[in-house]
């Protein structure tokens, strides 16, 4: 689902989730000591680490295809999620204002129709690392 006003669901995450919306908690490491400890451990290798969590209903997608301006670790905790990583990068090492698939910047069709570097289903315990 596109971003929706919380009052559409009477401010109920449960109702929004049942309607196909993802529940996203940015900087979850500020609320969970276990995630905070994981971030501290990763900061020995990576200079800036934080945790975002996503709870996405089956047959739904939290965000469309996009490029990030940072390294990303995906840790599948529950359920299954198909991840597709495309071989061609529209902008190598994008700055925040260059991230395609975000803020109205579309991913070029030739990228989405091109070769896939990764196309797999993650299951609980699987980890996927995508460098910037």
Image (tube, helix red, strand yellow):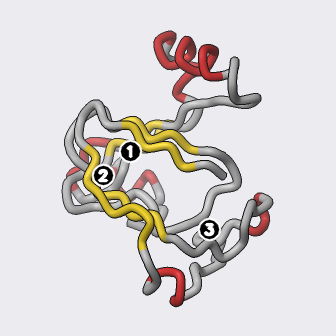
- Element on which disc 1 rests: strand
Residue under the point 70% across and 29% down: 46
Image x and y of residue 73, in percent: 51, 39
Mark 3–mark 2 distance (CA, rounded to whole Å) = 22 Å
Image x and y of residue 95, in percent: 79, 60
CB within 8 Å, label 2 to label 1: yes
Mark 3–mark 1 distance (CA, rounded to whole Å) = 18 Å
Image x and y of residue 110, in percent: 53, 89
Image x and y of residue 118, in percent: 39, 61
Mark 2–mark 1 distance (CA, rounded to whole Å) = 8 Å
Sequence-wise first label, 3 or 1:
1
- Element on which disc 2 rests: helix
* Tag 2 residue: 16
Residue 102's mark? 3
Decide which of 116, 4 is in the foreground and name it: 116
* Tag 1 residue: 23
Q: Nearer the viewer, mark 3 or mark 1?
A: 3
Residue under the point 35% across and 49% down: 10
Q: Is residue 68 above or below residue 107?
A: above
Sequence-wise first label, 2 or 1:
2
Residue under the point 58% across and 85% down: 108
- Element on which disc 3 rests: loop
Q: Nearer the viewer, mark 2 or mark 1?
A: 1
């Amino acid at each position: 689902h596109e971003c929706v006003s919380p009052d559409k669901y009477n401010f109920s995450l449960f109702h929004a989730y049942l309607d196909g919306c993802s529940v996203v908690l940015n900087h979850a490491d500020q609320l969970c000591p276990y995630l905070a400890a994981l971030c501290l451990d990763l900061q020995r290798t990576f200079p800036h680490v934080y945790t975002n969590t996503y709870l996405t209903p089956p047959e739904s997608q939290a965000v469309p295809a996009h490029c990030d301006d940072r390294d990303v670790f995906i840790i599948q905790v529950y359920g299954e999620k198909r991840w597709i990583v495309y071989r061609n990068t529209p902008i190598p090492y994008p700055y925040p204002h260059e991230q395609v698939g975000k803020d109205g910047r579309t991913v070029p069709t030739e990228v989405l129709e091109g070769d896939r570097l990764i196309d797999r289903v993650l299951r609980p315990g699987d980890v996927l690392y995508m460098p910037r």
